[in-house]
Structures are given as C-alpha cells and as structure tokens.
Image: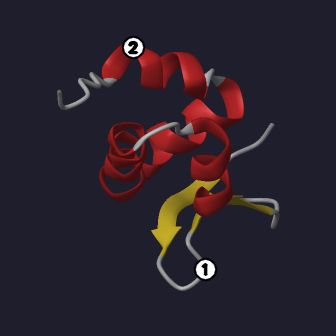
Amino acid sequence: MKRLISCEYNFDNCCVELKFTYGSMIAIDTIAVENEVADNMYQRSELDYLIYNAPLEYADLILNGDPEAYLKAVTEYKPIE
C-alpha cells in the first residue's frame, strides 16, 4: 500500500511533490497543468491558491479528479463590458 510521507510545493522547479515511504516520488508540473486546464486568469488564480495553500488537495484533484469541471464550478468569470 502506498504511504504518503509529504506533499509540498517546490518553488525551485514549480512542482507539487508527493513523497512515499517506499522511496518513490511524484512531481506534478504546475505550469503544464495550468496551460492545459485553465482558460483564463481566474481559473489560474484558483489553481495557484490550491498550490500554495492546499498542495495535497491540489494533487488529489489533478491525479484523481476532474480539474476542468472543478474550475468551471468554483470560478466566476464576468467579462468587462
């Protein structure tokens, strides 16, 4: 069974890193994720909030969830008229 030791954002490589007891590590490239799923600055801001304040929840969303559906549900985009 996988046992997570730590999950944190690494400022040096812009990745959320998950480290497991058996020695392996998963690094999620946050810039690549934003380029793929975020359509506007509001969605990027929501992802940034998760990256800095809740990296474990961010990793769970990216690895197990549907980030596009999440972003559509939590962001409100109103263009300036």
Residue 76: which quarter of the image?
A: top left
Q: Amino acid at mark 2?
A: Ala
Residue 36: which quarter of the image?
A: top right
Give the mark count: 2
Badge 1: few (under 14), some or many (20 or more) residues near its Cα, within 10 Å?
few
In the rendered view, does 50 fall on the left or right side of 27? left
SS at mark 1? loop
Looking at this view, is 71 or 2 the one in front? 71
In the rendered image, which residue does mark 1 sit on?
13
At a point 33% along the width and 21% down the height, the residue shown is 74
At a point 32% along the width and 25% down the height, the residue shown is 75
Residue 77 position within the rendered picture, expressed as x and y whole percent measured from the top left: 29, 25
Q: Amino acid at mark 1?
A: Asn
Residue 63 position within the rendered picture, expressed as x and y whole percent measured from the top left: 69, 35
In the rendered image, which residue does mark 2 sit on?
73
Q: Residue furthest front?
A: 81
At a point 47% along the width and 79% down the height, the residue shown is 11
